[in-house]
Amino acid sequence: MYALFLILNDIHKLDDIHNIFYDIGVGATTIDSVGMGKVLIEHDIDIPIFSSIRKLVDGNKPYNKLIISVIREEAKLRKAVDMINEELDHIHKPGVGFMFVLPVLECYGSKHTGAEIKEFKKR
């Protein structure tokens, strides 16, 4: 099992990202999040790179979303990563989002059984 984390700065793409997870047949949880840029702006710290971020910040609302998905099969993970990269066009549009994947060693409170987790650990 794998945990896919996506920090999505372009919140206009949120529905498109949710549709990707739906089409693949995996779930995801979305959480409002605030990055360091917002904190620096709120503390009135003048760093040139963050001046453009001011345009993204809307009042006290977070300007990004954290999307987490636990995906059992590597094939579905690969498909999700490829489709998200294609949708967000990370290479040509920096700052749209940040994504990383971690292995899940144990998982509780889901439809996964203990036997599946033990089998995964053996690999």
Image (cartoon, grey):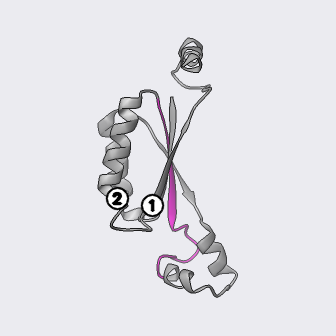
Examine the structure image and report whether residue 106 is included in the region drawn in magenta. no
Give the percent coordinates (x, y) of residue 81: 38, 44
Quarter holding residue 102: top right
Give the percent coordinates (x, y) of residue 41: 62, 80
**Residue at position x 46%, y 64% from top?**
9
**Residue at position x 35%, y 53% from top?**
85
Count of numbered circles in the view? 2
Give the percent coordinates (x, y) of residue 67: 49, 49
Q: Is label 2 in a helix, a strand or a loop?
A: helix
From this viewpoint, which residue is outermost toward the right?
43
Examine the structure image and report whether residue 65 is included in the region drawn in magenta. yes
Callout 1 amino acid? Gly
Residue placed most toward the observer, 37 or 62: 37
Instruction: Give, as a single range, the part of the protein colored magenta.
Output: 55-71
Q: Which mark is residue 88?
A: 2
Q: Earlier in the sequence, mark 2 or mark 1?
A: 2
Q: Which mark is residue 97?
A: 1
Give the percent coordinates (x, y) of residue 23: 29, 38
Residue placed most toward the observer, 19 or 35: 35
From this viewpoint, which residue is outermost toward the top?
115
Q: Is residue 57 left or right of residue 17?
A: right
Callout 2 amino acid? Leu
